[in-house]
């Protein structure tokens, strides 16, 4: 683990989730400048403790030097001297750059908390970050970050899935924290939604917009079950589907989309960012969306109740 995150004196911790920036290869491109303005204004108004970008920071296809596009994104974020964490989406390393090369750029920025994670499992950027107590050196919450990949093999079609070895890594990682202090409040961040995002629409409590299909992988590799069995994950936060921004609670876990932040790509929703606030000692979070015009919409509260899997039949 890298970096040090800590609850504030008032026992709160605020996260800004940016997603699907899709910064292109042209410097000073007007749509990208509007995206950078969203980043600037959101950070200025919300003053977060952590900035998270859930994939598709850039659009590398057709770009000669996507590493330069990636640096432009991190330059915008790092100017605030606030810790930030990233995961990759399906467009970040489509062409002319690898995930490994992009993550190496993160190491040039002092406030980047992203790390490659284990080399013997799928993906680049599987890691966890703990949030310490406001008044003592103890972990009080955990954030998990997973690489959801890009595209499935042609024999399957559609998008990649989080692989079983990553799910196993998550299970082992949770045991490290629970062994220390029991089940801690936790969130998980990745790019491509799980198939259960569809189930939340049919069976769960849903708030927000669903204006396009849920582009989840065809294969269900069991991450949701692992999240459920952990007893600690309150919510997951993804991007990928630009016209969806809903939160839906399914079996005690809130499955949430961010709000699209980038202008250089499709999407009918007004651009903005999702804000998430945690509370020390509570299995609870509040979240809302701050729009590019400064308005705040879509308040949503999750109060976590431990799952009793024996009753689920």
Image: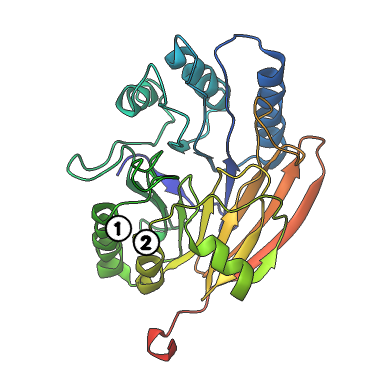
State if disc 2 and disc 1 touch (CB < 8 Å): yes
* Residue 204 seen anywhere in this rendered image of the structure: no
Q: Which residue is mark 2?
A: 223
Q: Nearer the viewer, residue 184 or 296?
A: 296
Relative to 186, say whether 25 is above or below.
above
Nearer to me, 43 or 119:
119
- Taking the spot 60% from the left edge, 75% from the top edge, the residue there is 203
Colouring method of the image: rainbow
Q: Quadrant of residue 177?
A: bottom left
Give the answer, above or below, for where 229 lies relative to 163: below
Judge whether residue 300 can be spotted in this image.
yes
Label 1 vs 2, first from the N-terminus: 1
Q: CA distance from mark 1 to mark 2?
A: 6 Å
- Give the left or right position of residue 57, taking residue 184 as reference: right
Q: Residues within 10 Å of mark 1 (few under 14, many from 20)?
A: many
Position of residue 94 in the picture relative to residue 255 (left or right): left
Count residues near mark 2 (Cα–Cα under 10 Å), then give few for <14, some for 14-19, many for 20+: many
Quadrant (top left, top right, bottom left, bottom right) of the C terminus: bottom left
Residue 97 vertical position relative to residue 130 in the rendered view, above or below: above
Q: Is residue 212 left or right of residue 23?
A: right
Badge number at residue 167 = 1
SS category of the residue bearing label 1:
helix
Tally of marks: 2
Q: Position of residue 262 (x, y in %)?
A: 65, 30
At x 69% / y 62%, what residue is drawn?
A: 300
State the image coordinates of residue 116 (x, y, percent, origin top left): 29, 36
Picture quadrant where residue 115 is located: top left
Q: Is residue 163 above or below residue 87?
A: below
Q: Secondary structure at mark 2?
A: helix
Which one is nearer the viewer's eye here, 252 or 285?
252
């Amino acid at each position: 683990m890298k970096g040090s995150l800590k609850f504030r004196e008032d026992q709160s911790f605020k996260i800004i989730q940016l997603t699907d920036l899709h910064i292109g290869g042209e410097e000073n491109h007007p749509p990208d400048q509007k995206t950078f303005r969203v980043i600037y204004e959101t950070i200025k108004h919300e003053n977060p403790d952590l900035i998270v970008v859930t994939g598709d920071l850039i659009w590398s296809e057709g770009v000669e030097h996507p590493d330069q596009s990636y640096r432009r994104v991190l330059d915008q974020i790092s100017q605030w001297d606030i810790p930030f964490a990233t995961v990759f989406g399906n467009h970040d390393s489509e062409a002319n750059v690898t995930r490994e090369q992009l993550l190496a750029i993160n190491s040039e920025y002092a406030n980047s908390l992203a790390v490659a994670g284990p080399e013997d499992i799928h993906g680049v950027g599987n890691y966890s970050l703990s949030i310490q107590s406001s008044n003592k050196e103890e972990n009080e919450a955990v954030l998990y970050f997973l690489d959801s990949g890009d595209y499935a093999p042609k024999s399957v079609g559609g998008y990649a899935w989080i692989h079983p070895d990553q799910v196993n890594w998550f299970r082992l990682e949770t045991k490290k924290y629970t062994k220390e202090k029991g089940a801690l409040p936790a969130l998980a961040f990745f790019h491509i939604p799980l198939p259960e995002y569809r189930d939340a629409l049919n069976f769960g409590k849903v708030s927000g917009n669903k204006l396009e299909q849920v582009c989840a992988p065809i294969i269900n590799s069991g991450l949701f079950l692992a999240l459920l069995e952990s007893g600690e994950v309150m919510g997951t936060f993804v991007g990928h589907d630009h016209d969806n921004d809903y939160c839906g609670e399914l079996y005690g876990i809130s499955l949430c989309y961010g709000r699209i932040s980038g202008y250089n790509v499709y999407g009918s929703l007004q651009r903005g960012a999702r804000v998430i606030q945690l509370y020390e000692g509570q299995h609870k979070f509040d979240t809302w969306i701050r729009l590019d015009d400064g308005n705040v919409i879509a308040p949503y509260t999750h109060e976590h109740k431990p799952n009793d899997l024996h009753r689920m039949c």
